[in-house]
Image: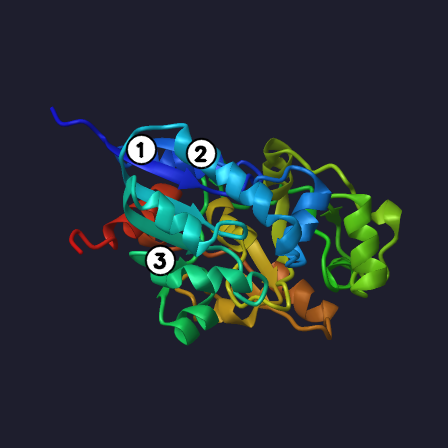
Amino acid sequence: MSEPKKCLLICPSFFSYDSEIKNAIERNGYTVRLYDERPFRGVVGKSLVRLGLSILTNSAIKKYYKEIYDSTDEHYDLLFIINPECITPDIVSYFKKKCEKVIVYMWDSFENKINSVKLIPCADVFFTFDPHDAHNYNIKFKPLFYVPDYICDPIDGSESYEVSFVGTAHSSRFKLVNDIAQGHSCFTFFYCPGKIVFFMKKFFFKELSGMKQNDVSFVPLNRKDVINILKSSKAIIDIAHPKQQGLTMRTIESIACQRKLITTNKNAQNYDFFSKSNVLIVDTDINNQVISEFLNLDHVALPAEIYTKYFIDNWVRDIIEEVPEHG
């Protein structure tokens, strides 16, 4: 019996999705070593990276990845990089001494992480969740996934909330969510990674219109609580980031939860799961009568192949199968 293939997974630590991807790769027959893509745990370090102040972060980033490289003598069949923000082409080239093939997947837009574009030539296959970036940069388009915990029974009328929102505070989300939820039983939760980030967004970047400090939590909900809220809701609200055209993780999770979706992302109508009974696309001019009529429509079950397609194990399998065997 041959030994399983080996994968080095570099992925930001983000609401346990890094561990879920690791587990899915293992279920696809690999042994996996997982490392956080970002060497910085604190808000200051992460903010310096986001602001592009590489002169203050390069030394720590190089040291971090050298320690990862030196920590193993193993040879890897795959270097799988998710949503790179810190890793550079030079670092990827260095890791190629120990890694046969390189996969990169973006769950953010290049407009938010422009340095990631530099990794396109370094990868054997490069994916993005953003159809606009896929077209403009001639890379592969692959929507996001859902994990097993989000699978639940269909709506049965016992839900506590007509609409719910759980997500990070950014742009005009607060106002739009409250406009959508007006007149409906709702649950809303806005998360911000720290007070410094909150005040920078509100007063420096002029985001978070109408939001006060007590409207936001600086501690995220755990996954179990998030899932319970979604299961207790008839519809899930999704407010797209203005710099992204790809569909959010929450959008894909609404498929697994078999819940209705109210979204500002007009691109949702171009996906294979779209149904006017299940998905309502809204703009900044919220019409509550339209929302009420949508909530009164029955949720329509999707074909089995749709649920299968977006399941994380199949998402991983599809990506790995795109890696060229030679060259």
Q: In this view, does 245 lie above or below 221?
A: below
Q: How crowded is mark 1: few (under 14 residues within 10 Å), some or many (20 or more)?
A: few
Q: Earlier in the sequence, mark 1 or mark 2?
A: 1
Residue 321, given in percent of the width and then of the height, sits at 24, 50
The quadrant of the picture occupied by the C terminus is bottom left
The residue carrying mark 2 is 68
Nearest the viewer among 76 and 158 is 76
Q: How crowded is mark 3: few (under 14 residues within 10 Å), some or many (20 or more)?
A: some
Q: Earlier in the sequence, mark 3 or mark 2?
A: 2
Nearest the viewer among 171 and 100 is 100
Residue 254, given in percent of the width and then of the height, sits at 52, 51
The residue carrying mark 3 is 122
Assess whether mark 3 and mark 1 are in contact (beta carbons under 8 angstroms).
no
Q: Earlier in the sequence, mark 1 or mark 3?
A: 1
Q: Which of marks 1 and 2 is in front?
A: 2
Asked if residue 315 lies left or right of residue 299, the reply is: left
The residue carrying mark 1 is 27
